[in-house]
Amino acid sequence: MSNENYCIKASSLVKKVTVESGQFAGTEAIFKEKDGEKRCILLIKILNQQTELRINNSDIKASC
């Protein structure tokens, strides 16, 4: 699957994703929406609050 399809797949089928690289690597997140062609907006829980995270599609994968 190409990197550009991560958000498309997440928006239609899978809501949970895992961040694979960067400072949030290993963190599970909830897909919120696409942010252009190469980025997504995710929701992550920090200090018991959901926070938006904008991240490159190539840095996430769908959680099974």
Image (tube, rainbow, N blue to C red):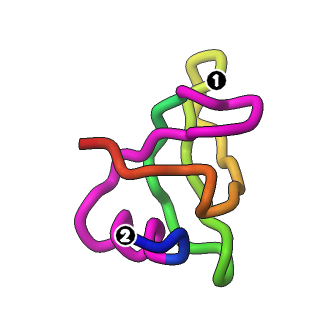
Specify the label residue 34 is tagged with.
none
Location of residue 17 in the rendering, given as x and y in whole percent from the top left corner: 42, 46
Q: Give the range drawn in magenta.
A: 5-26
Quadrant the N terminus occupies: bottom left
Would residue 44 appear left or right of 24 to someone viewing this image?
left
Residue at 76%, 30% in the rendered image = 23
SS at badge 2: helix
Q: How many labels does the image show?
A: 2
| Proximity of marks 1 and 2: CB atoms separated by less than 8 Å | no
Provide the residue designation for mark 2.
11
Pick out the residue farthest to the bottom: 37
The Cα–Cα distance between marks 1 and 2, rounded to whole angstroms, is: 22 Å
Q: Is residue 24 covered in magenta?
A: yes
- Residue type highlighted by circle 1: Ile
Location of residue 30 in the rendering, given as x and y in whole percent from the top left corner: 44, 46
Nearer the observer, disc 1 or disc 2?
A: 2
- Pointer 2 local density, CA inside 10 Å: few below 14, some 14–19, many at least 20: some
- Residue type highlighted by circle 2: Ser
Mark 2 or mark 1, which is nearer the start of the sequence? 2
Location of residue 5 in the rendering, given as x and y in whole percent from the top left corner: 44, 75
Q: Is residue 60 covered in magenta?
A: no
Q: Quadrant of residue 37?
A: bottom right
Provide the residue designation for mark 1.
46
Pick out the residue farthest to the front: 1
